Amino acid sequence: MASATFESLNPSTGEVIDSFPRSGADDVARAVDIARETWESWRLVPAPERGNILFRFAQVLEQHKAELSDLMTREMGKVKAEAGGDVQEAIDMSYYMGGEGRRLFGQTTPSELRDKFMMSVRMPVGVVGAITPWNFPIAIPAWKLCPAIVCGNTVVLKPAEDTPKLAQRFVDLLQEAGLPEGVVQIVHGFGEEAGDALVKHPDVPVITFTGSRETGVLVTKNAADELKHVHLELGGKNAIIVMDDADVDLAVDGILWSAFGTSGQRCTAASRVIVGSKVYEPLQSRLVERTEQLKLGYGLEEDVDVGPVINRAALEKIHSYTEIGEGEGAKLLTGGEIATDNGLDKGFFYRPTIFGDVDPQMRIAQEEIFGPTTALIRATDIDEAIRAANSVEFGLSSSIFTRDVNKAFRAMRDLNTGITYINAGTTGAEVHLPFGGTKGTGNGHREAGQAALDFYTEWKSIYVDYSGKLQRAQIDNAE
Ligand code: UN1
């Protein structure tokens, strides 16, 4: 076992939560060996039985929802209600994928020959290496592990080093739900050590990673020699478009929730707002006013709206973007500072920040900040708005507020993202539709929904000839 350890901190108070083993390549190799061995028996367990374990896991998560949400606010910082939502996503995913145990549908199709039967079935792939982020510390492990497990794979999980305790609880509760030992292994620690060893291990044919674009590219390169299946979810620079005909109050509600919920630390967060020139001024003033009413603080307290960001490095990065925005000539409308009053200086708190008069090509409108900062951009019509929305390297989520059905359909077709919302913000994806994005957000795979099954299985095509004679397909069969 790894002898070195690392600590997990409470981002609201700076207090140490617990310490964890800092795993290296040897620990990863041991976990992979067990997962590889367990796979030989796990792949033969009937899928409905595997699904039943997920139904029980969903129930166990329900029983522990309050405990997990409370721990999430302490270890990751998101406010109470949002922490409950994170756990609920895992519950929903576990029920949904549990049901797949009795589906996992393939196809049957007629043969071109007589007395011959053809079908395709989904086969498990083997050991899945899952590298998960800290921003959805219970939901995202569920997005990855529930489909992997029901499809008959085993898993080595390397959770983010900021939220090890939540990941450990997740795995403990899987065991409590009856998951046989060895099906899921956890290795704690850092990307350069544990994560990298997992990505390079020859007995891990599948890697699923949610994190930064930079690391995603590295994962792809390091997995290339073994031709691994790689799924990537790499964030976004998501835009909300507000057309002149929109319900402005509704749009402001959507912007507040999507820009500042989870302190802006969602891949789906709205870090750009593209506004029609007629509603720009009223929207800006209402948005700033509502933003200044948001209460920053420790998310276990009832009336707190916005919690801390994850750590000191994140706080500094977010603040550096305020300086970049000001340097680029954008107008700082509110926020733009590290909050230190009323004891907030013990944690990592950043004031919700809005820039106005932002040009779509500025860095604050192009780069993922992953914090409570959003940029207002003007657009004269829908063409300009869609052009601006699409002018970034990412393509995860997008949204339009409009009462004009024609504009809504234009947006559904032309916004180049994996997810588009009409009259809602950019966050809040449900577990039974595909989740993921275009362009620099990923590599074409999707998680959640039916799409996840395509990643965690290989198709096998099976031909059964019951004619009793040699029949040859794809040649001239005239007798
Ligand atoms: C993420 O930030 O990586 O749609 C996931 C949403 C959440 C999931 C976000 N259900 O905002």
Image (tube, rainbow, N blue to C red):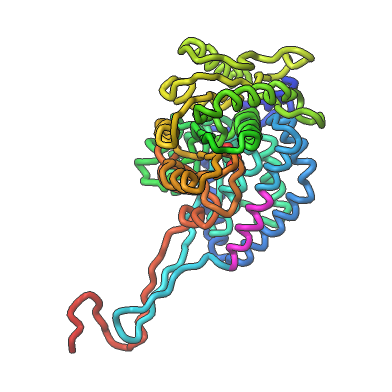
Q: Residue at x 78, y 46 (%)?
A: 64
Q: Which residue is drawn at 60% across and 42% down?
A: 424
In this orientation, which residue lies closer to the viewer: 327 or 205? 327
Q: Which residue is drawn at 68% across and 19% down?
A: 349
In this orientation, which residue lies closer to the viewer: 206 or 413? 413
Instruction: Report whether 107 appears left or right of 114.
Output: right
Quadrant location of the N terminus? top right
- Residue 101 lies in the magenta stretch: yes
Give the percent coordinates (x, y) of residue 413.
Answer: 42, 47
Question: Looking at the rendering, which quadrant does residue 139 occupy?
Answer: top right
Instruction: Please determine whether, in this image, residue 365 is positioned above or below residue 389.
Output: above
Residue segment shown in magenta? 90-102
- Find ligand 1 in the image and state its quadrant: top right
Give the total number of marks visible in the rendering.
0
Question: Looking at the rendering, which quadrant does residue 260 occupy?
Answer: top right
Give the percent coordinates (x, y) of residue 119.
Answer: 41, 73
Instruction: Report whether 472 appears left or right of 198.
Output: left
Give the percent coordinates (x, y) of residue 238.
Answer: 51, 34
